[in-house]
Image (cartoon, grey):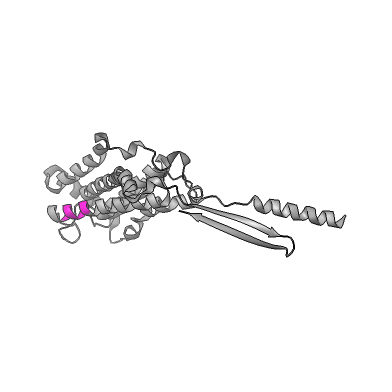
């Protein structure tokens, strides 16, 4: 009887162990299987209507550099913020500007339903940063608008706002409108702090937001080309499997791991 129970216990242990298998990396990240490599989505295809919002923000910001009525408006906004701020400033915007970008890359790792695997999120982030850096710096040193607090001629557009809104649009495209709304709230807070700290004019923040949104959309327009260039269309997402084994004679457990990428 004891021998039967011992054998039964061995089979139960083996059965439990064999039923244990870790999900692949893509599943751990919450990647939706309907969005596997090669599937085409609307945000991959350029459409003129996608330019309306960023172009409007950039245009209004540009006019605000010299236009008389908009210059009067941005000075009024600066005065209101001075009344609100007094001598109190806080510099959280220097660090928080990166929060939406970090969320775009990392939220899938903690269970948010990402549309793309980690490597593609990193690729879109890098592409968006490159596009944003080119646009922001080329315009800053072409327009040469004076900063409100120092007079340095690199105020338009706001780089902090561009970074934050770029991240917010990346989050929206990757995780949907609900997560995107939270990221946009953070980006709007960054824009508010740039005005509060007297680092930028209102038009700088609007122009920076437009550049950031456009940069994120450019990154997703270029993603199919990057997939083909890097050969990702021919490869499945990385998968990690662990198969356990039980040795009854030594009462020991062994694990065999397999990583495919």
Residue 172 position within the rendered picture, expressed as x and y whole percent measured from the top left: 37, 43
Can the viewer see residue 116 in this picture? yes
Where, by quadrant of the figure, is residue 86 drawn? bottom left
Q: Which residue is drawn at 34% across and 45% down?
A: 169
Q: Which residue in the rendered view is the most extreme toward the right?
A: 1
Q: Which residue is drawn at 69% across and 52% down?
A: 16
Can the viewer see residue 189 in this picture? no
From the image, give the main secondary structure of the stretch colored magenta: helix
Where 37 sits versus 94, above or below? above
Horizontal arrangement in the rendering, residue 187 relative to residue 208 (left or right): right
Residue 203 position within the rendered picture, expressed as x and y whole percent measured from the top left: 21, 47
**Towards the viewer: 62 or 227:** 227
**Towards the viewer: 120 or 3:** 3
Q: What stretch is highlighted in magenta?
A: 134-140
**Towards the viewer: 207 or 237:** 237
Tell me the quadrant of the picture where the N terminus can be found: bottom right
Q: Is residue 244 part of the magenta span, yes or no?
A: no
Where, by quadrant of the figure, is residue 173 drawn? top left
Residue 184 position within the rendered picture, expressed as x and y whole percent measured from the top left: 35, 46
Horizontal arrangement in the rendering, residue 59 relative to residue 28 (left or right): left
């Amino acid at each position: 009887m004891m021998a039967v129970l011992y054998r039964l216990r061995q089979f139960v242990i083996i059965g439990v162990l064999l039923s244990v298998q870790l999900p692949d990396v893509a599943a751990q990240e919450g990647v939706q299987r309907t969005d596997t490599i090669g599937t085409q989505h609307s945000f991959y295809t350029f459409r003129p209507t996608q330019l309306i919002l960023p172009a409007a923000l950039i245009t209004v910001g540009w006019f605000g550099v010299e236009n008389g009525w908009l210059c009067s408006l941005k000075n009024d906004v600066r005065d209101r913020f001075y009344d609100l701020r007094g001598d109190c400033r806080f510099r959280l915007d220097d660090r928080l500007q990166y929060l939406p970008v970090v969320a775009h890359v990392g939220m899938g790792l903690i269970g948010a339903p990402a549309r793309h695997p980690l490597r593609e999120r990193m690729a879109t982030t890098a592409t968006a940063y490159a596009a944003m850096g080119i646009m922001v710096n080329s315009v800053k040193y072409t327009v040469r608008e004076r900063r409100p607090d120092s007079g340095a001629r690199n105020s338009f557009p706001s780089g902090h706002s561009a970074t934050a809104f770029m991240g917010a649009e990346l989050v929206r495209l990757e995780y949907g409108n609900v997560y995107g709304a939270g990221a946009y709230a953070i980006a709007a807070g960054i824009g508010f702090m740039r005005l509060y700290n007297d680092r930028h004019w209102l038009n700088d923040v609007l122009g920076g937001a437009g550049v950031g949104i456009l940069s994120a959309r450019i990154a997703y327009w270029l993603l199919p080309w990057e997939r083909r260039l890097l050969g990702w269309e021919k490869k499945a997402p990385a998968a990690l499997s662990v198969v356990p084994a039980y040795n009854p004679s030594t009462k020991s457990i062994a694990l065999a791991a397999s990583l495919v990428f």
